[in-house]
Image: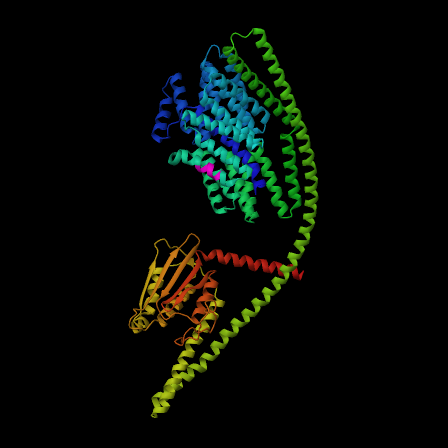
Amino acid sequence: MLNTCLPVYRFFRQCLIVASISLFIFIPIFSQDGKKTDSLKARLTNSTAAEKLNILNDLFKAYNQVDYQIAFNYAMEFDNLAKKMGDSVKIVEGGRKMAYSLMDLGKNDEAIKILIEILKIAERNKEQYPELKKQIKFILNNAGIAYNYLGNYDKALEYHYKSLLIREEEGDKKSIGTALNNLGMVFYDLKDPNKAIEYYIRAIQIKIELRDNSDLDRIFINLGICYNQLGDFKLATKQFDEGFNVCKENCSDNVKREGLLGLGIAHLGTKNLEKAENCFLQSLEISKKQHNSIYQINNYHQLSLLESSRGNDEKALAYLEEELVLAEGSDFVEPLIQLYDQFAKIYSKEHNYEKMAYYLNKYTQLKDSIYSDELIKNLAKVQTNYAERENIKTIYEQDQVLQLKQQLIERQRNQYIFIVAITLLVLGLATVLLVANRKQQRVSAELSMAKVKIQDQNQLLAAQNKQLDKRVKDKTADLSKTNLMLTQVNSELDNFLYKTSHDIRGPLMTLQGLCNLGLIESKDQKVTEILGKLGVQSEKMANILSRLTAVGKVNQSVLSPVKIDFKKLLTEISLTEEKKCKESGVNFSYTIDANVSVISDSELLRTILENLIDNGIKFYNNSVRVSPFVSVSVSQTPAHLLIKVEDNGIGILDTPTDEVFHMFMRASERSETGGVGLYLSKICTDKLGGEIKLEKTSKEGTLFLVQLPLDISVVIEKRRQQTEDIKMIQEEISS
């Protein structure tokens, strides 16, 4: 699971980069109030150029976190007006707004062109307009983010280091913390989460030192994603909870969108699929509302992985198709890499090797174009240059302290010590680089050997899979034959039962008629007594035949899904059982939860309830110390309908609970239907795709629990599909 999820973590980090610096780029935006934005739009027509710039700035802020396309339109209008006015400061500000929105819309190439252009303008005019000096570090930061999206990690690292150096020269710790956070994201994308965690912890330390909670929630989310990549999903979940705890009920849509995606990945890693799916769907909804393409891409990808883990490859492919439209319509590189990889894996599972090879080829070509030898060399060069600057600055500061403490030491000696220190530092750095280079060579050799072994193992596994597929197919064929035979036998038994019951009913009714006629005509007391007993037994046999006929009807019935009105149904049953309740003194009652909404077969459901209720009334406790009752409760869980039928009767004590639902199983001598009632309830429940069980039985009574699906349309469709599968297998066997 971890290897499957790793690629998308990188793209999720890239999305967090833009959000994590938003507080340092713009003044906090006001909440989008419809009346206020309408008022601002109305003022645009009759305003001066300077006033229009302020209004366009406010409108951009209002839509920046709500609808990126609308925000970009106002940014472009701001930029055009600034160019007409020839105001260099406003031109730079307008360019940054446009670039920021373009990055959110997935148009990073266009954003970089604008950022490079306004960087030149800011550099040329920074002495004339000091406020442009402050803008340069933000432009460098945005350029680093855009290059990160495009997979140009060497450029991204270079621009972020330049931004960090400027911030360190200014001595603004809050701004330094932002740069550290962004550097951590680049190292995360380079699959070095441990290095990324170091930068995040430094950023958090600065936040704590300054007592500044702004953007602290996002840094915790960044940490959580790093731990996701390391496979420590428990610690990752803790970091996401910390992030949400910072903003609590005031979390912005961006924080919710980012945190929910990361939390969903953590749940997916721990196999908690329902929670993971809920997080991804919430994050996807926010992303669609904001028109944020990269987060829609990432959420679709995670939902595809989730459905694939459930074995639902068809739905997984549907999510990937949604993702493919968005990814190929943007210039995000990493999403395409992990998208092609997932397509190849699913088609491999389905043995569609043509499509698997197609996507595997695209994956390899795109990945090789990003992670080239040139990229590795440039990354090493950028990090080395930054390390040299840091070391020189550190030595210089130490030298200044040393001069203050040792003012009496000769100047020449100080210079000599400084030169020796520099020489030792260079030698040490060279040694470290040499050792690191050799270690890298060893690792590369080991990786090559591991790759060969993996290829061999994959070939062996493919051969084993072919053999296993053949064995499974053979076993499936045998099982299909057996199921077909059982189905035919059951059908014949049902027909025999139904016809036999129907054929016996005629002679039995004749026998009852003769008994009644004999009772009327006979004057002999013994004959009358015998005829009376014979009539009672024939009546019992008639009841049993009615139940057996009902069994046949249930087995032959076709499910008719309708919405069930439980109040109406239970009221009708209570009227039917009213006479028996009065004769036995049983109090019948029922309760129905208000939120119950069920689609089922009303006749089968009525049969279940009638038999369970009649069973409770029939076996009531006739002790004078007991007030007999039968109660029914109807409730609903997110997945099932629950029906409980409870009584305080004589109980079922001498029969195992798993045998009470067998046909002709009589739990008491007071049974008049030969043990068919509970069996009838059982087959009706099975027909509805549910489960019935004897939950409790004792001298104090019994409790039956019936669990049914909320919508039998799903059961009908599943059985239809199973029937089609059996037919398909039978056709394959016959061919």
The residue positioned 57% from the left and 36% from the top of the image is: 7
Where in the figure is residue 529, as x and y percent of width and height? 36, 88
Please name the residue shown 54% across and 36% down the image: 9
Residue furthest to the bottom = 524
- Viewer-side residue, 214 vs 101: 214
Percent coordinates x, y for residue 11 in the rendering: 54, 34
Q: Secondary structure of the magenta portion, mostly?
A: helix
* Picture layout, residue 403 above or below residue 479: above
Q: Is residue 284 left or right of residue 474?
A: left
Q: Can residue 532 be seen in this view?
A: yes
Q: Is residue 23 shown above or below 671?
A: above
Q: Which colour scheme is used?
A: rainbow
Q: Quadrant of the N terminus?
A: top right
Q: What stretch is highlighted in magenta?
A: 236-241
* Quadrant (top left, top right, bottom left, bottom right) of the C terminus: bottom right
Q: Which of 185 and 566 is in front in this view?
A: 185
**Residue 116 within the segment the image draws in magenta:** no
Is residue 291 visible to the viewer in this orientation of the structure? no
Looking at the image, residue 226 lies above or below residue 315:
above
